[in-house]
Image (spheres, rainbow, N blue to C red):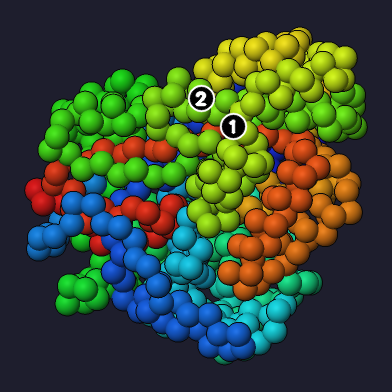
Amino acid sequence: MSQDRRTDRRSDASYWDRYTRARISRRTLLHGAATTAVAAGAIAIAGCSSSDSGAKSSGSPAVAATPPVQPEIVNGGGTPRRGGRFATANSATFGTFDPHLGIQVASAYFPRIYNVLLNQSATRPEWLFMDLAQSYETPDDTTYIFKIRPGVRIAPNDLGVPERDLDAEDVRVTLERIRTDSATTQYSFGKQHISSVSVSGDTVTVKTPEPYAWFLNRIGLFLNCIAPRELLAGDLSRLASKAAGAGPYRLVELTEGEHARFDANPNYYRTDEARGNTRLPYVDGLDVKVIYDRVTQRTAFQSGQIHMYWAAGLADAQGLGSGNAITNEPGFAYISMTMNPRRPPFDDPRVRRAISRAINRQEYVDRVYKGDARGDGVIAWSLGAYALGADELDRTYQPFNLDEAKQLVRQVGGIRLKMMYPAGTTIQEHGAHLPIFLGQMASAGIQVDQDPQSFAVWIGNYHEMNYDCSLALNQLYETPELPLLMHTKGGPFGDNSYIQGLGEPDIEAAVKKANTQLDVQARIQAVHDAQKVIYDKDPIMLPLVTPIDHYVYPAGVRNITTGIGTSNYLLNDFWLDG
């Protein structure tokens, strides 16, 4: 808890770890954690047409960058209008704008300031957005060769970074920082999955130690944005409040806890191919206010002060009037029942199964989210094709069956649990989930001794696996990788922190296969197979439900993109009618 980030022996792998070791205040924690999960919703509008978005990648096997499906467009049509500023609000402070250290709201703006090599949609893995990488090839299962796009020009800035094109050396310097600096948010990725980075002309070759299924997802995360090498030299503390990149916008003003201003980058390389190759972005900039209270945000939206409102639910969104545009986005975080199989009674699969059968996920959907959520399996529904179908889960793998739960309780001679949880937090609606869970366990005859803890104590005990079971918060999961690894002997980060699996050889083998399968269709099948093996052994982690997020825009915001998850934030062909 008190370790310095740079001397910690383990990789900085966890979202919660970052908060724990940063030792920020509880108020910041509650605001920041709740908001980072949806932070990019602050600017969650974009379009699907972009210059060179149909670039092909070559190599063996070849992977086409042309999206077989396009994002959905809400409030489209009409003639684009240039100008105006898009105003929005966040309910947390920004934190550092260092593109490889930021974890709070600032991280949602990294793809607006910087560039990723490419980005793969979490909800539609067949959809790729080629950004700084014009194409890529994979000559073998551990080699990725990225061809760098010419003309990706750095924005004007006051940090002394020249207005030049980004190049392959910028990529190398960025990736070397990520793989060698333990303070960076993606150090675990870099250390574990990048063995070397080399440059030849306009290409960058990245080697991985072994086949890694999620390499494209991870390399394209916003926390792996490519920064100019001049920016990463010298005093890096200056990046807390300043930036210099080649993205569509540039940070020109920041008052922490109050507001930020982003102006359009006059050097931005992308154009709107669908509309005569018009220069992007259409708007002059983004104005972001910090408004902690949702009611105040709603009022600001109604009075026209901001152009987007993250609604409390569909009813809240619809209550703002019929003339608005609403997008419905899947969430990527959830609350789960987490059990420590190294401690009784959770070393007995009948106990784990009794708890599973006592959980009625529809009750959380109805009571907590008023229908704006869906029940989760081992892999959350929001991960699309990777998740098992709802009917299959309800019928076969995790049915709500109170009679079976009661029978299992009797078989083991009664079940009594000591359950820790973070007390008094509104993160992920934890306070609303808790009484429902307690009621469901009581209905099955399962006794729960509650152990409420402060957030800091809870996360420390969670990290050290100092618990019997927990009603646990979870970070964002945009691939099946970590949820599957939670069921392995080493846990999600391979260091026996947070949660450990059963150590069953067939689970270990199935998860390994899923996490090293490069072909998308074969990977989907391997992820399905791994889930079924886990269910056969009775899972030690039971996710409950993941909500649907609703964003509301006035009719004047046109060409709003939805349907590709956080990949929306990379696209910039929306406009304001007036």
Q: In the picture provided, is 449 more to the left or to the right than 38?
A: right
Residue at image point 41% right, 56% down: 564
Tag shown at residue 133: none
Q: In the picture provided, is 360 more to the left or to the right than 71?
A: right
Q: How many numbered discs sit on the rendered protein?
A: 2
Instruction: Confirm or deny contact between disc 1 and disc 2 (CB under 8 A).
Output: yes
Question: Between 267 and 196, which is closer to the camera in this rendering?
Answer: 196
Residue at image point 68% right, 28% down: 357
Residue 396: percent from left, percent from top: 64, 42
Res. 50 in view: yes
When asked about the image quadrant of residue 152, the answer is bottom left
Looking at the image, is mark 1 or mark 2 earlier in the sequence?
Answer: 2
Residue at image point 37% right, 54% down: 563
Res. 32 in view: no
Few, some or many residues within 10 Å of mark 2 (<14, 14–19, 20+): many
Q: Secondary structure at mark 2?
A: helix
Question: Between 75 and 425, which is closer to the camera in this rendering?
Answer: 75
When asked about the image quadrant of residue 276, the answer is bottom left
Residue 457: percent from left, percent from top: 74, 20
Q: CA distance from mark 1 to mark 2?
A: 8 Å
Residue 374: percent from left, percent from top: 48, 37
Tag shown at residue 364: 2
Say which amino acid is labelled 1.
Leu
Residue 37: percent from left, percent from top: 50, 39
When asked about the image quadrant of residue 201, the answer is bottom right
- For residue 467, above or below residue 86: above
Tag shown at residue 544: 1
Say which amino acid is labelled 2.
Tyr
- Of the 4 image quadrants, the one containing the N terminus is top right
Q: In the picture provided, is 295 more to the left or to the right than 307?
A: right
Residue at image point 21% right, 73% down: 274
Few, some or many residues within 10 Å of mark 1 (<14, 14–19, 20+): many
